[in-house]
Amino acid sequence: MKSSRIGFVGVGRMGANMARRLHDTGHPVVAIHDANARIATQLAQELGTKAVEKVSDVSRLSDVIFTVVTDDAAMRAIFLGPDNLFTDARGKLFINCATISPAVHVEIQKKGGELGAEVLEAPMASSLTHAREGKLYMMLAGKEESFRRAEPLLKDLTLSLRYIGGPGKAAELKALVNMVMNINTAGLAEGLGLAEALGLDLKMVKEVFSQTGANSRVLETDGPDMLEREHSTFFSASHAAKDSGIALELAKRHGLHLPLLEASKRQYDQMIKVGLGEIDKSGISELTFRSRKADLAKE
């Protein structure tokens, strides 16, 4: 696959690090497009490649196209809009990494198949550092033969690959991953917020949590940020709200009432409402610590 020309649509923090990783491992990244032309141009200069104005130029110039966009609307725009990736689709492989509604992934895969393209959904459960170091955890769905075609290339981006099944299935599973993660983050924020109100030493509380049933991956990743009020964005509250909404829609469609999911989504929605939507989801602690709620009230 190292002879395949690689294109990227969406080079925010995650997409840019994936492009850097592929470039570093010898894959020719030949075309980059982003809604923000400035960041596309900067990355193209860094990698010695081309930033293109039209999304259709990415598929025209590339054999394999990665897309890392924000939501359903952006996904439909790049594949089904007036200027789109399917303008030159036959024989191309599209690997779509965004966390979006499973139904949209299914729609895009169906359209791509009709046009002679191969389409994979490939949501990721990893951080920016993992993307840069080629240590992503990636879930794949679509035709298994398309997965096998992509597998050698994806191994240069990942520590672990998991083929889930047919169209929509990886997106469903990713929604569940983020649902549970977001609930855990909200629960940790409430536990630490109550600990603060009780006058307990929060570093001691965090250490006790780590040795008991209160331990979790979120305690490791978000706990220090909550204590230090360091909410540099790795996974924003607005993304948490969006992804929780995807899971909530799936639950409603199957007649399930999930009160923890509903409650945590309200918290992330509240973060957006009070102007905290673009900080890291660990910033949910700003809503639960009594001292910090007072700070919000002042603002």
Image: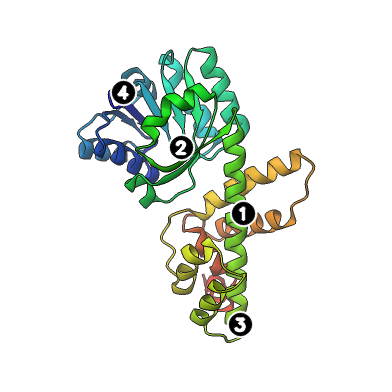
* Circle 2 SS class: loop
Q: Residue at x 47, y 17 (%)?
A: 117
Q: Give the mark toward the camera: 2 or 4.
A: 4
Labelled disc at residue 272: none
Labelled disc at residue 69: 2
- Decide which of 51, 49 is in the foreground and name it: 49
Please name the amino acid that badge 4 sits on.
Answer: Ser
Above or below: residue 104 compared with residue 202:
above
Colouring: rainbow
Q: Residue at x 44, y 37 (%)?
A: 68
Question: Circle 1: is it few (<14), some (14-19), or many (20+) Cα within 10 Å?
Answer: some
> Sequence-wise, which precedes: disc 3 or disc 1?
1
Question: Circle 3: is it few (<14), some (14-19), or many (20+) Cα within 10 Å?
Answer: few
> Sequence-wise, which precedes: disc 3 or disc 2?
2
Is residue 144 found left or right of 131 in the rendered image? Answer: right
> Sequence-wise, which precedes: disc 2 or disc 4?
4
Spatial CA span between label 2 and label 1: 22 Å
Spatial CA span between label 2 and label 4: 22 Å
> Sequence-wise, which precedes: disc 3 or disc 4?
4
Spatial CA span between label 3 and label 1: 26 Å
Labelled disc at residue 4: 4
Spatial CA span between label 3 and label 4: 57 Å
Q: Position of residue 155 (x, y in %)?
A: 38, 37
Above or below: residue 244 compared with residue 29:
below
Quadrant location of residue 287?
A: bottom right
Please name the amino acid that badge 1 sits on.
Answer: Val
